[in-house]
Amino acid sequence: MGNGPVILLVQGAGRDRLTNILERNGFVVRRAHNGKQAVAQALETQPDLALIDPSSLRIGGARLCQRLKRTIESVPIIWVLDEGATSTENDGADFFLQRPFPPRKLVDKMRELLPEGEGRVLSAGDIVFHIEDRQVHKGGLEYRLTPKQANLLEALMRKAGEVLSRRFLMKHVWNTDYLGDTRTLDVHIRWVREAIEDNPSSPVYLRTVRGVGYRFEVFETEPSED
């Protein structure tokens, strides 16, 4: 996938765990291994966000942040701190993330800092949902959802782990409080399952909570970043 937000990842050579996390979540990664490469990549690619791991570099983190801020003034910067390390606001980053941390925490913070519209990508497991394009990528396949299907999937993924009632979904997606006939909701749930489930008849992600509604399951399959 090459149409996601562009992330400038600055870290020492040979460390690719962060790259894997970013690419799995729909980001386009441009790597740099030192300060000079970071500035050159920033000028060339005009990234949407910069993620730096100063502990793996020879240049100081504060100095690198300052150089990047001068080069790409409005681009947010996340600084990855080693466990026990300290930082100050004067170091120049917009957010400091300390190891160990779950991949979801990093991804959520990146989407929060991205410019409006750039972070509209949701992911879970091997599912990547590009909201603006209404496209779901899963297992190398691509599915395009209808507007109602996309609204339904977005509502479920944004509240992953929570049970969403039929009333909530009918109000959120169809803008109605009428519950006399929810077959439309059930049909759309089935269509969404056909896009995101390996076996729609035995769903893993989009689960039915009998008598209540539906829940999008959360899977923390990745260990903490170390």
Image (spheres, grey):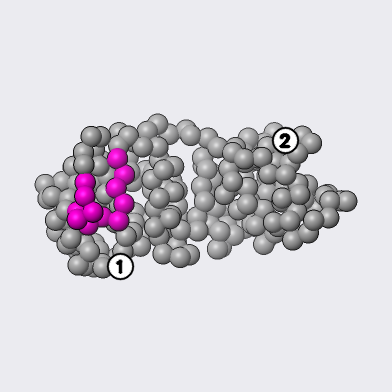
Q: Position of residue 53 (x, y in %)?
A: 23, 46
Residue carrying label 2: 209
Q: Position of residue 95 (x, y in %)?
A: 31, 52
Q: Is residue 124 left or right of residue 144?
A: left
Sequence-first disc among 1 and 2: 1
Q: Local crowd at mark 2 within 10 Å, few (<14), some, or many (≥20)?
A: few
- Which residue appears at 31% of the width and 44% of the height? 97
Q: Which mark is residue 74?
A: 1
Q: Is residue 40 left or right of residue 143?
A: left
Asked whether residue 79 is in view, the answer is yes
Q: Is residue 169 above or below residue 213?
A: below
Q: Is residue 174 above or below residue 97?
A: below
Q: Say what secondary structure mark 1 lies in.
A: loop
* CA–CA distance in space, label 1 to label 2: 44 Å
Quarter of the rendering containing residue 174 = bottom right
- Which residue appears at 79% of the width and 36% of the height? 211
Look at the image and give the residue range highlighted in magenta: 87-98
Specify whether residue 94 is painted magenta. Answer: yes
Task: Name the residue nearer the viewer: 96 or 226.
Answer: 96
